[in-house]
């Protein structure tokens, strides 16, 4: 099985205001074949600083109903160290969604690189605001 590049993201929701509003956008990316969500865990930090990781199977019924549409099979790719790292970065009374996904769109390209004995030398992200600014400057 060939797997495309895999990435993760942690999104904090101060005040424990995870509403699931991001789920339809994630679902659209999955439905289009752009990504495949491999794992998703909710991490909470209470007022006293206690951190808890909530696997989808253990989520409250309302949260589970919102997230079930993603069809994530329990993969256990995220673990205790990941939960602790994200939990320590959270402010008290916050929730984070920690998600790992495969860039399905790039799987064939990644396979061709491996077949050509290509070696990844660098990879990174450029903030969208910087790109937008540079593009606006280039047009002027």
Image (cartoon, grey):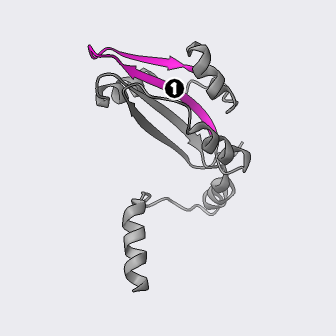
Looking at the image, residue 46 lies above or below residue 114: above
Q: Residue at x 55, y 39 (%)?
A: 22
Question: Residue 73: within the magenta?
Answer: no
* Category of crowding for the residue at label 1, using alpha-carbon neighbours closer than 10 angstroms: few (below 14), some (14–19), many (at least 20): many
- Tell me the chief SS of the magenta region: strand
Extreme bottom residue here? 140
Which quarter of the figure has residue 139?
A: bottom left
Q: Residue at x 64, y 46 (%)?
A: 35
**Could you tell me which secondary element the residue under label 1 belongs to?**
strand
The number of discs equals: 1
Q: Is residue 71 left or right of residue 102?
A: right
Residue range in magenta is: 37-56
Q: Nearer the viewer, residue 122 or 59?
A: 59
Q: Position of residue 17 (x, y in %)?
A: 44, 28
Q: Quadrant of the C terminus?
A: bottom left
Question: Residue 41: within the magenta?
Answer: yes
Q: Residue at x 38, y 74 (%)?
A: 134
Q: Nearer the viewer, residue 19 or 82?
A: 19
Extreme left residue here? 48
Q: Is residue 61 left or right of residue 126?
A: right
Q: Quadrant of the N terminus?
A: top right
Which quarter of the figure has residue 11?
A: top left
Q: Position of residue 49 (x, y in %)?
A: 28, 17
Residue annotated with mark 1: 41
Looking at the image, residue 12 lies above or below residue 129: above
Q: Position of residue 78 (x, y in %)?
A: 50, 27
């Amino acid at each position: 099985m060939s797997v495309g590049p895999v990435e993760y993201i942690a999104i904090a929701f101060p005040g424990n205001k995870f509403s699931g509003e991001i789920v339809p956008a994630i679902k659209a990316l999955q439905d289009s074949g752009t990504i495949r969500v491999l794992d998703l865990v909710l991490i909470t930090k209470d007022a006293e600083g206690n951190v808890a990781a909530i696997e989808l199977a253990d989520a409250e019924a309302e949260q589970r109903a919102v997230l079930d549409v993603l069809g994530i099979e329990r993969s256990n790719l995220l673990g205790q160290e990941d939960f602790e790292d994200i939990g320590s970065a959270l402010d008290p009374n916050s929730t984070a969604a920690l998600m790992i996904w495969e860039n399905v769109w790039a799987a064939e390209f990644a396979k061709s690189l491996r077949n050509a004995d290509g070696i990844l030398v660098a990879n990174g992200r450029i903030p969208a605001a910087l790109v937008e600014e540079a593009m606006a400057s280039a047009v002027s």
